[in-house]
Image: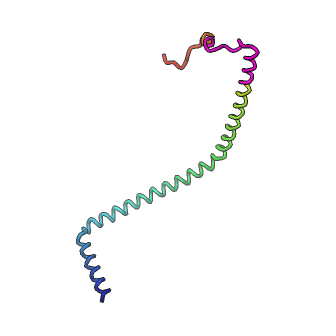
Amino acid sequence: MEKEAIAVASQEVSQEFKTLIDSDALDSMKQLQHTILGRLQDSNAVLSHFNDYSEQCFAEVSGDLSANTRLLKSMKSDLDYIFQKLRSLKAKIKATYPDAFPDDSTLEALDARPDLEVPR
């Protein structure tokens, strides 16, 4: 008996809710939800295709990228070594021949080239 009373009460509450909601508005919302679902599925398909394409492109260039990265690191260490040796040689030459390298004031007088960075 108690279960029947609960069932009847739930049916009455359900009927009251149905009277509160306009069926045309509900159908319109369902249609809108289906439209949005379709758009989201299309977007998902496009993004999945793009991810597959990006993965393929990355696989094609990753070998070159890592090889070039190693090459640049090697070149940097070589250049660091070269500049270290140049600084050492310059220091030795400057110690032996103090006038071999001009200071900043005489350097500006010696360099009479036009400055190409300044707009005219």
Residue 119 is covered by the magenta coloring: no
Q: Give the residue displayed 68% in from the left and 38% down from the top.
A: 73
> In this view, which residue lies farthest toward the front?
95
Say which quarter of the image contains residue 66. Answer: top right
Percent of width and height locating residue 119: 49, 18
> Where 24 falls versus 65 (above or below)?
below
> Where 53 falls versus 96 (above or below)?
below
Q: Give the residue displayed 27% in from the left and 83% down from the top.
A: 8
Q: How many labels does the image show?
A: 0
In the shown orientation, is residue 8 left or right of residue 119? left
Percent of width and height locating residue 45: 48, 57
The one of 66 and 29 positioned closer to us in this rendering: 66
Residue 100 is covered by the magenta coloring: yes
The one of 3 and 69 positioned closer to us in this rendering: 3
Say which quarter of the image contains residue 43. Answer: bottom left
Screen quadrant of the N terminus: bottom left
Q: Give the residue displayed 27% in from the left and 81% down from the top.
A: 9
In the shown orientation, is residue 39 left or right of residue 59? left
Task: Name the colouring of the figure.
Answer: rainbow
Q: Give the residue displayed 66% in from the left and 13% down from the top.
A: 102
Main SS, magenta residues: helix
Which contiguous range is marked in magenta?
86-107
Percent of width and height locating residue 11: 28, 79
The one of 33 and 21 positioned closer to us in this rendering: 21
Percent of width and height locating residue 104: 62, 15
